[in-house]
Image (cartoon, rainbow, N blue to C red):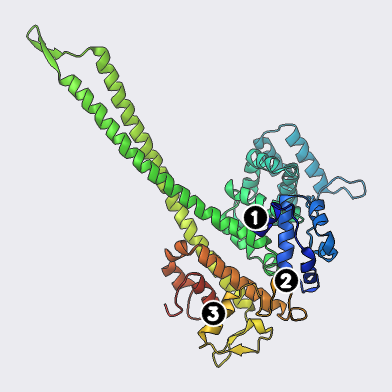
Amino acid sequence: MVFTSLSNFQFIWPWQEWANVKGLPKWAPQRVFVQEVLEREIRLSYFEKIKQSIEDAAELEGLLPPKAGPNFRYHTDESKESTEGHRLSKELVSMVRGRKTTRDIILWVEEQIVPANGAKFTVDVVSQTLLDIGSKSFTHLITVLERYGQIISKLCPDEEMQLLLMDEVSAYWKNSTQMTAIAIDRMMGYRLISNLAIVKWVFSPANVDQYHVSDRPWEILRNTVSKTYNRISDLRKEIQTLTKSIQVAKEARAKAMKELEEAKSILEIVECQPVSSERPGRLRRLQGFADKAKEEEVTIEESLEAKQALLARGLEEGKELLRLLFKSFVDVLTERLPPVSADGDVPNLRAGDPNVTFPASDPEAATMEIDNENGADNNSQVNGENTEVGYTIGELEQWCLCTLGYLKSFSRQYATEIWSHIGMLDEEVFVERIHPLIRKAAFSGLCRQMNQ
């Protein structure tokens, strides 16, 4: 990535050649690109360092993100009025510092906060306070989630409450895209938030409005989809390993049983009676080896069954995730894409005028419409320079181009998983009535012909 490469060269870059992007609309791809590069540079360094690196292009300072830091709603300040939320937050902090058990805190929450203030207010106070306790570092956040995650789980058992929880995370870390993404990612890892809830949150109105001006919602969505399928991939590898281990265990058990039976079969005649000629100690050892081999085989088989159950659950989750993901893309795009004309002409988003169209029968134009997913036109030049004055594509058109581009990107990146559920998607998502630009974007990512 460009920001990683810049970190290898002390973040030195001729930013003055990009200074003109500050004058572009906030949705212009060149401006958004610079804005996101600067934000990621700060992740690898610190705010003052990156600000210094663009001192030759002072205009770009306006594209720097706010200094990363928490936005704690219940911060104790003499200048602010102390509310019920401040009091309860302070009491929760005291309980955490006093090493109260999770059970004690849950009882306190259920008895002291929920009845008098309601579930939404409770999620607000508890999540904001726990996030603030874990705000010093990534390690602090992990520790808080491990110790007190049950409190959050108790308060947010369903998707509706999990959506509220993510709103609180986003509000608390509104000045830090990185910490927002990390917090939501870790909450998903601890099963405090479901992947489906995250997808619904990313496609909520507040985030949808940011699609073309920020990578924040897309980063969270990428993390969610990747983690879902990484889990499935890890489970498949573990099942493959356990399957091989079972074979080894069966061979070891068979060998131990064979040695035991052979030892038992060796007899001698004593006082006219056949008795085992092996010493009892050796027979006991062989019997112990056989029992241990059998126990190990059973243990591995039980582990395999558990992993197979998790894989079946993961595959079902993955299927539901894809269904929701593509339906969400279709819904938000359908609301905003200019309609196809009565003559069947597809809107030319790059013209900035929904009334300007190109014939739907022109496959080259249609492909170009999707492939230029970042909104760059043919007059673009190196380092953000542009031969035209300003940026001619309107905000709605740029939003559509950006979202179609991400639809294509997700389709390409997860094509293997998508093709395994293509029948379901064809029946429920890629129906005849969807907008042709949506179909082109998804099918282009899948390398699929439009007539398939």
- Amino acid found under the numbered disc labelled 1: Met
- Amino acid found under the numbered disc labelled 2: Gly
| Discs 3/2, front | 2
Q: Relative to 39, say whether 342 is above or below.
A: below
Residue ID at (61%, 73%) = 373
Q: Dividing the picture into quarters, in which one does residue 138 lie?
A: top right
Residue 20: in sight, yes or no?
Answer: yes
Q: Residues within 10 Å of mark 3 (few under 14, many from 20)?
A: some
The residue tagged 2 is 384
Residue 96, horizontal then vertical, whole percent:
73, 36
Which label sits on residue 161? 1
Residue 205, horizontal then vertical, whole percent:
68, 68
Residue ID at (55%, 53%) = 227
The residue tagged 3 is 367
Q: Residues within 10 Å of mark 2 (few under 14, many from 20)?
A: some
Q: Relative to 394, say whether 243 is above or below.
A: above
Q: Secondary structure at mark 1?
A: helix
